[in-house]
Amino acid sequence: MPNEFDATGFATRAVHVGNGTDKDSGAIKRPITMANSYALPYDPTDMNWSSADGNLYTRNGGTNQKYLQERIASLEGGEDCVVLASGVAALSGLFFALLNQGDHVIFSSVTYIAVYRLLHELLNNKFGVETTIVDTSDPANVEAALRPNTKLIHIETPGNPTLTVSDIAAIADIAHRHGALLSVDNTFASPYNQRPVELGADFSVESLTKYINGHGDAMGGAIVGKKAHLDQIRAASQVNLGGTISPFNAWLIMRGSVTLPLRMRQHNENALATARWLEKQPCVSFVAYPGLESHPGHAVAVRQMSPGYGGVLSFGLKADHDTHNRFVSYLKIVTSAVSLGHDESLIVFLGENDERQYLYPVEFHNGFFRFSVGIEDIGDILGDLKQALIQCGLEVLE
Ligand SMILES: *Cc1c(COP(=O)(O)O)cnc(C)c1O
């Protein structure tokens, strides 16, 4: 989707791409078009009713969706983009459109739970798609899992919830040498810190619900890649499966995305400061954050993430199960809730009985926190953690 802002910087594109003057009113912000249908030509008999080009019916696409697609394609550095109703609609739409019975998929051992369910249970059991789960933090594991029918490699980096890092360029190279495609879930990094398509991936998938909207008030998903692939996904998964985003949510995400660069700068800075502070605490058993030198994927993260490492980290406490819940109950600024990438800090205690724990490094086996560090003042975030740890009777240093 070439546009007049291609030569400008990331922050300029986050403001301008997809915006324009409304022809009817002269408003310098484009309006929300809540119509389900658009006017037909004089003789509609030759229309392709499943076309996603032009404006016909909002399930097939509409103005607000198109503006948002232009912006996300530009920020991710991709040729084309499809936006759908949620991150999971984007992931399932990608898998449904690309995979056929008998195809083989390799996917990373750390992925969003719905990816595990979609690939390893639904597509596998119901539709005969073969799947192999590998620890993609070592590209050699990917190479070893290839089969003649491997169609797709799907990785998430940094991965939710362990922050495992996988080398996008190395895995893209392996995929392409064997005629397979690579998709990368880029939700944790956001395009501000990492652009998988520029690193050689065929697809970058985003939950727009998280950093790109950034305000915790709308859901959406995006797939970025080559137009030929995306036309296929649009036809199969938007028009015919119907995972269309509402024009209002597309508009909200468009507005939220304007400040993505500003917010990400603060998320990066606050998360690194929080990770460093937690790492010093005697009561903390481990901290997983790709920006820390102690992270096993730090060197790869330095190569493929810039200028920062995102706002999510995970950590454990040297404490029993109930102390973890008490700690959360004492927090006043940090909110206990799922999701991530919101303006506010969010924490979730992932207990000991997650069915996928066997796929995670051993330090994650006793229960841990996933912490999405918000854009509040860092002194208030650290102060909140500190007072809650002290109330739990745990040892805290400055
Ligand atoms: C939240 C999330 C998703 C799913 O996105 P929804 O918008 O909730 O459907 C996918 N991948 C990752 C890494 C996520 O964190």
Image (cartoon, rainbow, N blue to C red):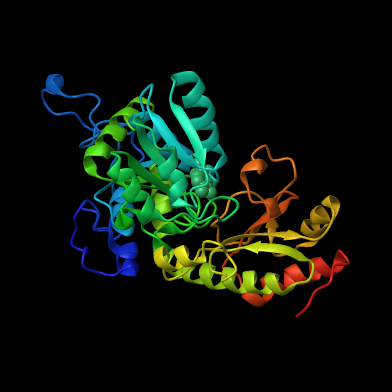
Left or right, 190 with respect to 54, comes to right
- Please tell me which residue is depicted at 78% across the width and 71% down the height of the picture: 282
- Please tell me which residue is depicted at 85% across the width and 54% down the height of the picture: 320
Looking at the image, which is closer to me, 189 or 124? 124
Left or right, 34 with respect to 267, comes to left
* Residue 64 visible: no
* Residue 326 visible: yes
Quadrant in which the C terminus is drawn: bottom right
| Rendering coords of residue 276 (x, y %) | 64, 73
- Please tell me which residue is depicted at 55% across the width and 53% down the height of the picture: 216
| Residue extending farthest right | 393
| Rendering coords of residue 163 (x, y %) | 56, 56
Looking at the image, which is closer to me, 307 or 326? 307
Tell me where residue 343 sits by quadrant. bottom right
| Rendering coords of residue 81 (x, y %) | 30, 46
Left or right, 393 with respect to 157, comes to right
Left or right, 39 with respect to 240, comes to left
- Please tell me which residue is depicted at 76% across the width and 62% down the height of the picture: 331
Tell me where residue 305 sits by quadrant. bottom left
| Residue extending farthest bottom | 398
Numbered circles on residues, count = 0
| Rendering coords of residue 150 (x, y %) | 36, 33
